[in-house]
Structure formats: structure tokens, C-alpha cells
Amino acid sequence: MSDQRDDRNAAVIRFPQSRVSPTGKSAKYLGLGAMAKVIGAPTRQTTGHWCSPCQGLWYGYLLEVACPVCGNRQG
């Protein structure tokens, strides 16, 4: 039972980030955000964030937005 509408020509719409060329090097682990450290959040409850100036990933709890290394809040 396939839906007739699914058979249309569909184009892949890429996210703007997909236009960025990978650098070929792996990202650094920047640690946990301040709130995640204070409350001892389990790893599975943290969310990953990218820090452009540090070229790495850090993990925060809920709505944390500041990189624990440089304080960047812009991604």
C-alpha cells in the first residue's frame, strides 16, 4: 500500500551546514559545561555542541550554550 504522493520527483534538500567542507581532522573533546558538572548529569542526558573557535565538541545539560573552554556562545 504505497501512497501515490510518495512517487513524485523528490529532491534532497541539504542543510546549510552540509556545504561546509570537512577539514579531514577529527574534532577535539572540550569537556562538559558548567551546569552538567555541577549537577553531575549522566552522559546520556547531555547534548553535544560545536565550538567553531576551539574546533571541538562539548557537552552541556539542558539549555547550556557557553563553551567550557573559551566561553563562545555562537556555535
Image: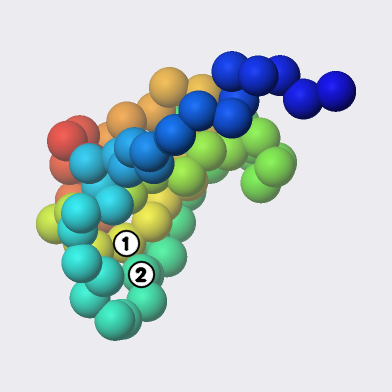
Camera-side residue of 50 and 21: 21
Residue at (28, 52) in percent of width and height: 18
In the image, is residue 51 above or below residue 27?
above
Residue 36 in view in this figure: no
Picture coordinates of residue 27 (x, y %)?
36, 69
* Furthest residue in direction bottom, as rendered: 24
Identified by mark 1, the residue type is Gly
Q: Is residue 20 visible?
A: yes
Colour mode? rainbow
Location of residue 29 by image quarter: bottom left
Quarter of the picture holding the C terminus: top left
Of callouts 1 and 2, the N-terminal one: 2
Q: Residue at x 29, y 81 (%)?
A: 24
To which residue does mark 2 refer? 27
x, y percentage for residue 33?
42, 41
Label 1 residue SS:
strand
Residue at image x 14%, y 57%? Answer: 53
Disc 1 target residue: 56
